[in-house]
Image: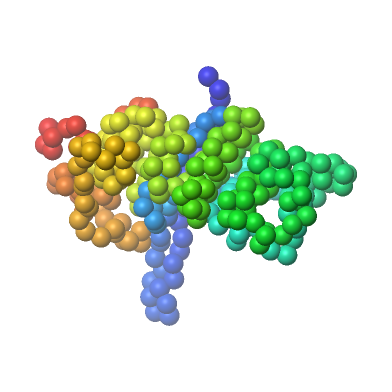
Amino acid sequence: MTDPVMQARALERHYNVGGGLFGKTRVLRAVGGVDFDLTPGKTLAVVGESGCGKSTLARMVAMIEEPTEGTLSLDGKPVLPEDWADLRKSVQIVFQDPYGSLNPRQRIGAILEEPLIINRKEMSKQDRQDKGREMLRLVGLRPEHYDRYPHMFSGGQRQRIAIARALMLDPKVVVLDEPVSALDLSIQSSILNLLRELQDRLHLAYLFISHDLSVVRHVADDLIVMYLGRAIEKGPKADVFANPLHPYTKALLSATPRTTPNAAKERIKLIGELPSPMAIPDGCPFAPRCWKVQPDCRAKVPALSGGAHGAACFYPEGEAAGD
């Protein structure tokens, strides 16, 4: 079995939010105690509603933000802020908006060469150009694109350029933060197929952030479902899709379009508003919206348990409330 290239244990990220001139500072718990392993050649997907903390988790893994608590390790060594400059070569990120992440005043060649200029000072100009052109070829673009500007490309082509730039330093881990959500549906599948081909060729570990379970079904090997900053279910993708244990996961899956429209389907509509991350209720954070809630759900926080496929729920799906 391949060893994990990156491990996270009890990762947390909190923000102090000011209350104004006379108000009291409050704590926003964006991520609260998430564990995972990233393995070469595999994709771990993180899904959940907007505001669940998945993008904050992505920024911590990409070493853009420092965890408030918990540990992050790369190749068995702790990831510390003083080492970020060196370690970022091994962890790169692809953002949601490809146009916003590319400098409109730079030619594509300069955008691709910039990481090498900063981190590989020993490389000659010709070597940088050769690597940049080779990376363009790997992502399905032509040599003449090297001297063009970002505005001259379609959204799908710009995302290919962003992927090429992320791979210029030969990373081990690539964080994909909603990489296809800004693209037309007709383009999404080609980008997802490209990411899979590059993963197989380069043996990359992916952390894939998404709110779209139909996309996750296509790309993920393992899955973490987040709610209000906490991982409430995790496991192999096939197990989670076939047998969701947490009521929230079941509700998410019930809203996912199916390829067989005539198949029987139970649509679950959640009642109530998503609680504020600055005022998370006592006990299970999903209790105010859960149809299986019991008194102990409001009194205690359920731990994520269950082995390879587990859920943070006192009454997981398949068990009647009160059993």
Query: In the figure, residue 306 lies in which quadrant?
Result: top left
Q: Is residue 320 left or right of residue 138?
A: left
Extreme residue toward the top, this view: 1
In percent of width and height, residue 225 lies at 37, 42
Extreme residue toward the left, this view: 322
In percent of width and height, residue 290 lies at 20, 48
Which residue is pictured at 35% across the width and 58% down the height? 277
Image coloring type: rainbow
Q: Nearer the viewer, residue 72 or 269?
A: 269
Which residue is pictured at 32% across the width and 61% down the height? 276
Which residue is pictured at 22% across the width and 52% down the height? 270
Query: In the figure, residue 152 lies in which quadrant?
Result: bottom right
Extreme residue toward the bottom, this view: 21
Total number of numbered labels? Answer: 0
Q: Is residue 32 in view from this perspective?
A: no
In percent of width and height, residue 253 lies at 30, 42
* 312 relative to 63, above or below: above
Q: Nearer the viewer, residue 266 or 174?
A: 266
* 6 relative to 298, above or below: above
Instruction: Check the picture and name the quadrant holding the C terminus.
Output: top left
Which residue is pictured at 43% across the width and 52% down the height? 53
Q: Is residue 250 left or right of residue 181?
A: left
In percent of width and height, residue 155 lies at 58, 55
Q: Nearer the viewer, residue 275 or 12?
A: 275
Q: Is residue 220 in view from this perspective?
A: yes
Q: Is residue 4 left or right of residue 294?
A: right
Q: Is residue 210 left or right of residue 300?
A: right
Query: In the figure, residue 173 lies in which quadrant?
Result: top right
